[in-house]
Amino acid sequence: MKRKDTRILLVDDEPDILEIVGYNLSSEGYQIVTADNGVKAIKQAKKHKPHLIILDVMMPEMDGIEACEKLRNIPELSETVITFLTARGEDYSQVAGFDAGADDYITKPVKPKVLLSKVKALLRRFKEPDEGETSLQVGDLIINREEYKIVKGEEEIVLPRKEFELLSLLASKPGKVFKREEILDSVWGNEVVVGGRTIDVHIRKLREKLGDDKFTTVKGVGYKFVV
């Protein structure tokens, strides 16, 4: 994916942030679209279908957490990578961000070189639709990899992208214990360091949506999918 074809939506209610960060990214050749609140962010995302959304947490009208939750419920944005901008020390925002479906977070203030490096790494996570097998059936679940949808019985479930990829990985080999390092590498990639609790948050969300009995924790090792 070439930079000139890469769309980034930058969302922040501070004009200086939009100008400075937008300038640095556009100077690298990325297509930049901006919004100054969560409501406008959703409209811009639907219109431009960005590859990456950089989303501030504290904003008027609709904050970043709520905006992220709504963005993750839009099927055509299932491939989009979302990262939060958080102020130093806002650990609660980081946890809430992962709960809302974010892929990562960037701590403000951030130096231009660090920002560009982070953006490059995040964009490596963007995956084009698979050309191989598009669906997998395990137990009462049908996993449609092409449409990023789950069918459980008569119910259709749309999962955030990372939850879907985590489920797809675990369900690809039912009964196998996937080590935490293997999960991080396969789902999040090894370009960016994310906290170990990231996996735990996503597993908890999957248990809530698909059933606690489908996932087993192997303490000190990782997780497995149970049919």
Image (tube, rainbow, N blue to C red):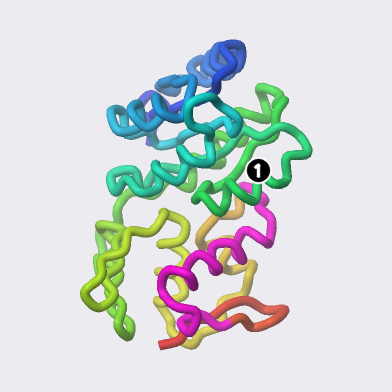
| Residue sticking out furthest to the right | 89
Q: Which residue is outermost to the front? A: 61
Using the image, determine if residue 41 lies above or below residue 221: above
Q: Residue at x 32, y 45 (%)?
A: 74
Q: Residue at horizontal 72%, vertical 25%?
A: 109
Which quadrant of the figure has residue 41? top left
Q: How many marks?
A: 1
Amino acid under label 1? Answer: Ser
Residue 148 appears in the figure? yes
What residue is drawn where x is 53% and y is 48%? 103
Residue drawn 64% across and 36% down? 106
Relative horizontal placement of residue 50, taking residue 99 as reference (left or right): left
Q: Is residue 12 magenta?
A: no
Residue 87: % across, % down: 71, 32
Q: Classify mark 1: residues with Cα within 10 Å, few (<14), some (14-19) or many (20+).
A: some
In this rendering, is residue 153 above or below 98?
below
Hey, which quadrant is residue 83 in on the image? top right
Helix, strand or loop for the magenta stretch, by majority: helix
List the residue tagged with mark 1: 93
Q: Quadrant of the C terminus?
A: bottom left
Query: Is residue 133 at all visible to an observer of this figure?
Result: no
Q: Position of residue 159 (x, y in %)?
A: 38, 59
Q: Position of residue 202 (x, y in %)?
A: 54, 62
Give the residues drawn in magenta, as a range. 192-216
Q: Residue 43 at what x, y percent from top left? A: 33, 28
Q: Is residue 63 above or below residue 130?
A: above
Q: Quadrant of the N terminus?
A: top left
Looking at this view, name the residue that lies furthest to the left: 154
Task: Judge by depth and name the residue closer to the eye, 183 or 96.
Answer: 96
Residue 204 lies in magenta, yes or no?
A: yes
Q: Secondary structure at mark 1?
A: helix
